[in-house]
Amino acid sequence: MFPEAFIRQMRQSIGDSSWSALEAALGQAPPVSIRLNKHRVPDDLSLLPMQDGRVPWHPDGYYLEERPVFTLDPLFHAGAYYVQEASSMFIYELLRQTGRLGRKGLRVLDLCAAPGGKTTLLYDAIDGRLTANEVVPNRASILRENLERWGALNVAVLSGQVEQFVYSSTQYDVILVDAPCSGEGMFRKDPASIGEWSLEQVQVCARRQEGILEGIESVLAPGGLLIYSTCTYNRAENDANFLAFCGKHSFAPVELDIPESWGIVRTDSGYQFYPHLVRGEGFFAAACEKPGDPVSVSASGGNFRQLVPLPKRQRSLVDEWVDRPEELGYWQTPSGEILALPLYQEFYLKSIDPFFGAKWFGCLVGQIKGSDFIPSHAFAMSRYVGQGIPRVALDREQALVYLKKENPEVVQAPRGWVLATYGGLTLGWMKVMPNRINNYLPSERRIRMRVD
């Protein structure tokens, strides 16, 4: 089943008996886990998937007894949880033990962000400015979709190269490099990756990771935290790369206090997850701190290259739809789309807008056509959608009809724009007309599989 070179590598690394245990674990079904969205809690907690114990290293992580059809769960579409592999939730524990959890004003960069599991984790864990980068444009679109579903607002989504971050001269207090790797830790979840593995590919990945780490060094602020992770086991991509980087730049690797009962293996520089020891997939994580004292940076003002401030008369029209509008600034794209940004948008002005072409800021609120405001789906999912906007509660059958982009039958609904909800959480917009309901769920978000 596994390449002989991989088996030899693992036997040399962990020993024959441990390899036998790992091989047996890789022949079992992978565990299923989710991370709850603490900002989008349904009215009835029993609507959430069956829980089968907590993930030890994340307070909102839960295992499931079996894998449901997430596509047919309206709460998944409402952003009530993220389907995330349990081992990768360990990033939370790294942030907690290094004192970054909940610290205000941090500038955080998720360098290899798609599809968004770790990005949404970072979003919940910090209180600052989050930049999520994905070099592959179509994967960046998936990242943005997942962030919108999560209700994230204060995030910039980019599709840039490491060199662009260096050129921007902006430094970040926390950088996560979840590096592209040979994927050994995902063999159980993705059997096709077994056939793609080779020792040559391991070396190719190791060199690529080395280049990413070296390129991002100057982007980390003094006193900043660098988190490096992979979903692989071998030393070349993990300890060897990370220790060489730390030694070259005199960075101090971080040591954590990890309960023995968690089953995580301490390596020379970080923490290794093996499926025969933890309830999760193969994963490696390490962290280090850059020498020096943190320096506060004041951002300069100015104007965006393509965005213009929303005129005052139109702002009052948008404010009627928004909860806590005093916290936001509104900007308009050349095509007329209205973006809502937090009031510290100077960070986007100074650090991102001049240096990146493919980018997205904040939350798309909607458009003004004539005297009417047309709200967007991202706005429906955001935490700023007005509390006074009418809501129509759907049962599961109606919600699935809505999510297929069909028009659910509802007995009573006020005329005009309403939010379709399930379990108290928003699914998107509907517009109630005198003799019909128009479903405004974006076509690309609709359920395509058969709903029985």
Image (tube, helix red, strand yellow):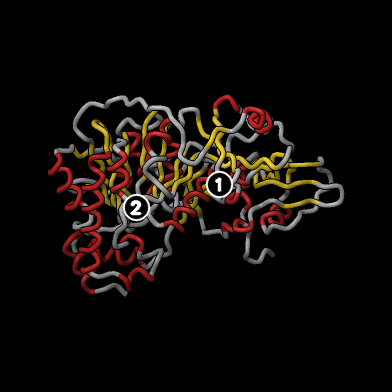
In this rendering, the answer to whether 318 lies above or below 286 is above
Residue 346 in view in this figure: yes
Choose between 357 and 50: the one closer to the eye. 357
Disc 2 residue type? Val
Q: Which mark is residue 278?
A: 2
Q: Secondary structure at mark 1?
A: helix
Badge 1 is on which residue?
Answer: 149
Q: Name the foreground residue: 452 vs 25.
A: 452
Q: Position of residue 240 (x, y in %)?
A: 17, 53
Image location (x, y in percent) of residue 51: 52, 49
User: In this rendering, would 208 be left or right of 279?
Assistant: left
Please state the horizontal and vertical placement of residue 129, each as a whole percent of the image.
Answer: 42, 34
Q: Nearer the viewer, residue 411 or 299?
A: 299
Q: Amino acid at mark 1?
A: Arg
Left or right, 137 with respect to 374, comes to left
- Figure quadrant of the N terminus: bottom left
In space, the residues marked 1 and 2 are separated at their CA atoms by 29 Å
73 and 108: which is toward the camera: 108
